[in-house]
Amino acid sequence: MNSSHLNILFWGIVLRDLRLALRHGADTLGSVLFLCVTTTLFPLALGPSPDLLRRMAPGILWVCTLLAALLPLERLFGADIDDGTLDHLLLTGISPTLIALAKMLTHWLTTGLPLLILSGPLALMLNLPMRVLPILLIGLFLGSVILSLIGGMGACIVHGARHSSMILSLLTLPLITPALIFGAGSLDSAMTGLSWQANIELLGAFAAIALPLCPLAAGAGLRIAAE
Amino acid sequence: MLTNAPLPILKADTLCVYRNETPIFINVSFTLNAGEALLLTGPNGAGKSTLLRVLAGLRRPNSGCLFWQGKPIELYTHAHTHRVAYLGHQDALKPSLSVRENLALFVRPEHSAEYKKLDHSGYVTDSKPNTLEAALTAMNILPLVDKPARMLSAGQKRRVALTRVLLAQAPLWLLDEPSLGLDHMAIDFLGTAIAQHRAQGGLVIAATHTPLPMPEAIQLSLLGTTNTPPS
């Protein structure tokens, strides 16, 4: 198989999943609405003090975004494994690693990207200073990529287990705590006028490690799931 | 067509598969030459579907070996995926995608030249339907090409799944209950496709409970764990 055919297959899988996501908008919409609702709950619970909200905003936004992105993960591979599509994808000759990577990319495009766009207005609602907004977006961009990678890996591994959605959250959330710490930390530093670059660089390093390793692990998981 | 090949194309040697230490089937052996067909029969749970998955390379046998023209398949798993056209017991169609969108990933437009390097069984791919339209016509389902799969009946979905087998242009067809839900006319189309495939030197292995239009097929009966290879 030559690389152009692999290319066609890889983007074919991405396009097909995007098309499916468009026709079943509920997954994407569910995550977006979840983020809206949970973020608005905080001012109601904590009181409308602008100073308090500004101080809490980095943590609120990061935690809510990661939780929202976790929602559609379970069906990311589950649907294809259950209806037999995965067998046919494997038999096209494309490696399971690339199938997993295509799925993770689709997850980011259909969940990470809408959440990223929405986090801007929500940050303003929580009284986050305008000048740190770019740092929030850079951080959340890397954070959502990391979650798509690690969450996709988790989704492959837990498939077939009983209560898989619960296990998936329990497996994925501890693994992305470094991203949460660096991400929220970068915003805190920026707001107090300290240097935020180191935190963002550590986030970038995390993403750079996850990018090759997670699809490999997920691919191995897919092979086992097919058996 | 096959030209004086000394080795059988496909040889299975004492394949055993266990699930949780319970044997699904043990010591399954057979050989297939170009143009031959193998009919897998046996009661529910005898391991027909599992055997097809092993032959497709989707599952490893716990022991035993598979050879393609004398070469063990486990060493050439990537090459093996190109020899296999698999029809599972599920149709694997997404209800919200149209027939064309469902099959788009599985059109292999240009691989025949490279494919012949991989594989010297002499299987003729040039005259096979290698476009979506030709394959759909062979299964008599062309008018439904732009319908979403959820609008199709069970038999029509099966025909779309069979179209994917044609599109693979592979020498080894592994069919799990291919006639499931098909009407008489569709079974005739399936018979024509299988006969054409065999005439071109292809192999067919089908698991079934109902008679299939496969003349002179070798019978292999799986009887759970007391199975014996055919003589």
Image (cartoon, coloured by chain):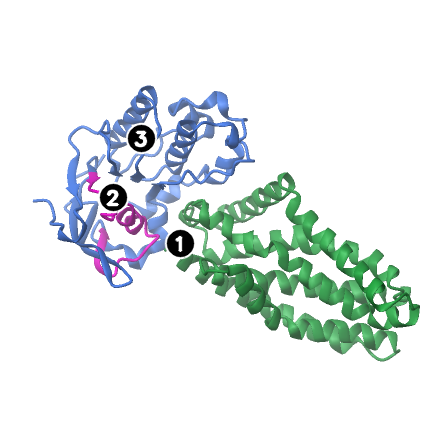
Chain colours: A green, B blue
**In screen coordinates, is A78 left or right of B68?**
right
Which quadrant of the figure has residue B83? top left
Q: Which mark, by number, is residue B179?
A: 3
Q: Which residue is mark 2?
A: B44
Which residue is denoted by mark 1 in the rendering?
A: A226
Asked whether residue B217 appears in the rendered view, the answer is yes
Residues marked 3 and 1, same chain = no
For disc 2, the chain is: B
- Tell me if mark 3 has few (under 14), some (14-19) or many (20+) residues whose alpha carbon lies within 10 angstroms of its own: many
In the image, what residue occupies the spot 49% across and 48% down?
A80
> Is residue A126 placed above or below B29 in the rendered structure?
below
Q: Which residue is drawn at the image coordinates 64% and 65% (left, top)? A: A146
Q: Are marks 2 and 3 on the same chain?
A: yes
The reply to whether the magenta stretch includes residue B57 is: yes
Q: Which residues are magenta?
A: B39-67
Task: Residue B202: give x, y in percent of width and height.
Answer: 26, 36
Name the secondary structure under disc 1. Answer: helix
Q: CA distance from mark 3 to mark 1?
A: 24 Å
- Circle 3: element type: loop
CA distance for labels 2 and 3: 16 Å
- Give neighbour class at mark 2: few <14, some 14-19, many 20+ (Cα, 10 Å): few
Given the image, what chain letter belongs to the residue carrying mark 3?
B
